[in-house]
Image (spheres, helix red, strand yellow):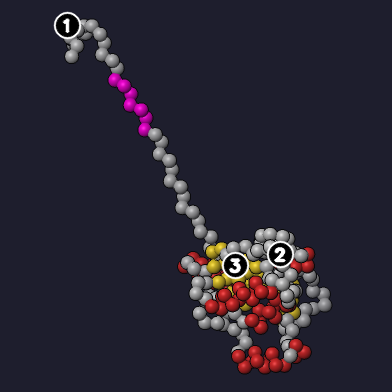
Amino acid sequence: MKIHSRFSAPALLLLLAAGAAFAQPVYRHVDKNGKVTFSDQPPAADAQAAAPRGGAAGGSGPALPYELRQVAQRYPVTIYTGDECGPCGAGRSLLVTRGIPFEERTVKSNEDIEALQRLSGGQPSLPLLSIGSQQLKGFSDAEWSQYLDAAGYPKSAQLPAGYRNPPAQPLVAIQAAPARPVAAPAPAPVPAPAAANGPTPSNPAGIKF
């Protein structure tokens, strides 16, 4: 699977060689509705801080440290991956090594691909990383790290021992087939009325067979 990156190899080498002093900073912008975007322009002085979201990535085990939990609530991280995708594995490894709480959505079915296309607003590209409302198409170690730094995630793992990110889930939830209705039991046959004993108009002699 082709790796899409905003940094060409020569440009990335020059960026690394220049050192942190010359690295282009990335700033968070939060509008009055709480929408978060990133750019190389500093936010205005009257910019408001984003309101915390409902919850962080729903992992299992011990609770996240307070500061990490606050960042994960404001800028939740989700990675979208596919089968036999080397860059997807590299991106997942970066998040795990750095101790980023994240959710993973797998893209396998046609419904998943269509949903990813609507989500990304164009041609689907894997992996896709979302940090809050910011989307990064294709894997780039330098680019992903830069945006995670800007969001406020720690550079080294701070997850408590025993913490586990939630298992990967399909992008489009698989719906179970509706259960077949249980057939009502057939009514019991009504027994025929017993033949009357003795003579009848059709059997005046009362003969039994």
Residue placed under numbered mark 3 in the picture: 104
Give neighbour class at mark 2: few <14, some 14-19, many 20+ (Cα, 10 Å). Answer: few
Check disc 1 and give the amino acid type: Ala
Residue placed under numbered mark 2 in the picture: 161
Q: Residue at x 55, y 72 (%)?
A: 81
Relative to 131, residue 7 above or below: below
Foreground label between 2 and 1: 2
> Residue 39 appears at what percent x and percent y?
71, 81
Foreground label between 2 and 3: 2
Tell me which corner region of the image, top left, top right, bottom left or bottom right, holds residue 90.
bottom right
> Residue 55 appears at what percent x and percent y?
70, 61
Q: Kindly check if marks 2 and 1 are in contact, taking CB atoms under 8 A apart as contact.
A: no
Q: For numbered disc 1, what is the local secondary structure?
A: loop
| Mark 1 / mark 3, whichever is N-terminal | 3
Range of the magenta residues? 186-192
Q: CA distance from mark 2 to mark 3?
A: 20 Å
Q: For numbered disc 2, what is the local secondary structure?
A: loop
Q: Residue at x 54, y 68 (%)?
A: 106
Q: Residue at x 52, y 69 (%)?
A: 107
Could one spot residue 122 in this view of the protein? no
Magenta run includes residue 95: no
| Mark 2 / mark 3, whichever is N-terminal | 3
Q: Nearer the viewer, residue 34 or 94?
A: 94
- As drawn, the label of residue 205 is 1
